[in-house]
Image (spheres, rainbow, N blue to C red):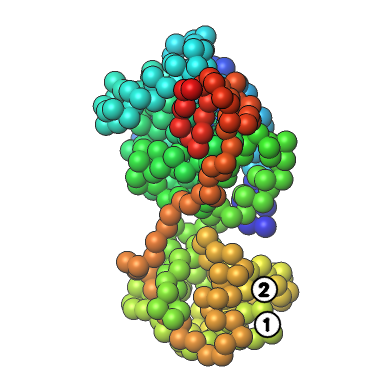
Amino acid sequence: MRQIMMLLTSSKLLPFGQSSKLIGSHLIATLAAMLLTCCSSDSEVKAETSQTTANIGKTLIVYYSYTGNCREIVSSLTAQVEADVLEIQPAEKGLKYEANNYALGTQLLNAIKANPNDASSYPAIDPVNVSLSDYQNIIIVTPLWWSQMAAIMQTFLFNNGAQMAGKHVGLIVSSHSSGISGVVADAQRLLPSVTWAGDALWINASNHSNRASLIENWLPTQNFQTSNDMTQKLYITIGGVTKTATLVSNSSTEALVAQLQQGDITYEAHDYGNFEKVGDMGHSFPQNNEQITTEPGDLILYQGSNLCIYYDTNSWNFTRIGRLDYMTQADIKQWVNAGGGNVTVTLSLNNTTAVHRVTTKAATSDKFISLNGTHTKMPSKGVYIDNCKKIIK
Ligand SMILES: Cc1cc2nc3c(=O)[nH]c(=O)nc-3n(C[C@H](O)[C@H](O)[C@H](O)COP(=O)(O)O)c2cc1C
């Protein structure tokens, strides 16, 4: 289970149906910072520094929900992740997006599609009083409309995409049954500069009741930053393939990063115990040993100079260095060539070859959806959705 599950235990759910008021610790921190600002410039620097440190690892859930499914998803999410919650509300109340064969929903999306770079193409939303700089991780929970991101959520991302640059962002999409690749494409267009935490989670009518376990399985696949993570990424190359890893923050990783600033480290590694690829880096680093039961993807420092890349579990007293990003156990085994003998490993602080993308599960294309959102056989007459397209017969 990844660190976010261990460190984050309860949630501060903000009042739904209000214009996005953030309460609690942030307000107190902001007031305290304002007070300090009045006192002296020295205090100002200290207040800013401590707030920046505190923000690392903080999570915000942003959602929009028209018929309540995304709201239920958020409730399940907040039972598992400590996060602040922000609900996006359309400025115009009481609209029926599904009326007249979903004419209004279609109209809003068509306006965005016609001029996606023009702010006036997006439907107005209530003011959002959240300081995105307070958060390192953002989870977006949005409905799918006509195989695109619901227009109301698109407005929020259009307005705030620049402030979200560099954040670790996860995406959960709720649809009746249509696949979510169009919503992922919208998210990528609206948030070109974020770090996607991993694959988007698709929740639909047939698995909505299992949302708690879907979320439980999805969260560990997301590389959300925790307060114990370093922002500096480690790049590891084996067999010409480079992967990224998130480093934890301790004196061992600080020394490793300092060494890597002098140049890359290349060493030979071999399999050990059917659970790790290990090799001597040729440098000795401080140890912060503790009893650890490893998981696939863990990076461990053993006896100060050996780096172990774990592809299975082992319990020992050694030092946690970090973890590989975005990789399944099968991916790791293949990459390290588990059981395949010696490999050359290169560690670096820079990389130009690693590719990070959000991918989605395949769309279902063999179902028809009536306009009240239920599955249907191909109707002989009427309006229905076939493979994300509106058909009128
Ligand atoms: C305007 C509109 C268009 C929709 N288009 C689709 C669609 O193309 N495919 C689909 O599977 N569901 C579609 N839906 C259904 C929603 O994606 C689904 O019910 C979702 O769970 C709604 O989330 P919410 O209850 O949080 O609003 C549409 C709903 C609306 C209101």
> On the rendered image, what quadrant is the N terminus found in?
bottom right
Q: Horizontally, is 274 left or right of 283 in the view?
A: right
Residue 105 falls in image quadrant = top left
Category of crowding for the residue at label 1, using alpha-carbon neighbours closer than 10 angstroms: few (below 14), some (14–19), many (at least 20) = few
Residue 90 or 282: which is nearer the viewer? 90
Q: Does any portion of residue 210 appear in the rendered image?
A: yes
The correct choice, above or below, for 163 with respect to 248 in the image is above
Judged from the image, the secondary structure of the residue bearing numbered disc 1 is loop
Residue 374 or 350: which is nearer the viewer? 374
The residue positioned 71% from the left and 45% from the top of the image is 213
Reading the image, the residue beneath label 1 is 274
Q: CA distance from mark 2 to mark 1?
A: 7 Å
Total numbered labels: 2
Q: Are marks 2 and 1 in contact (CB under 8 Å)?
A: yes
Q: Position of residue 249 (x, y in %)?
A: 52, 62
The residue positioned 61% from the left and 39% from the top of the image is 203
Q: Does any portion of residue 149 appear in the rendered image?
A: no
The residue positioned 68% from the left and 37% from the top of the image is 206
Q: Position of residue 123 (x, y in %)?
A: 38, 19
Residue 152 falls in image quadrant = top left
The residue positioned 40% from the left and 38% from the top of the image is 186
Reading the image, the residue beneath label 2 is 312
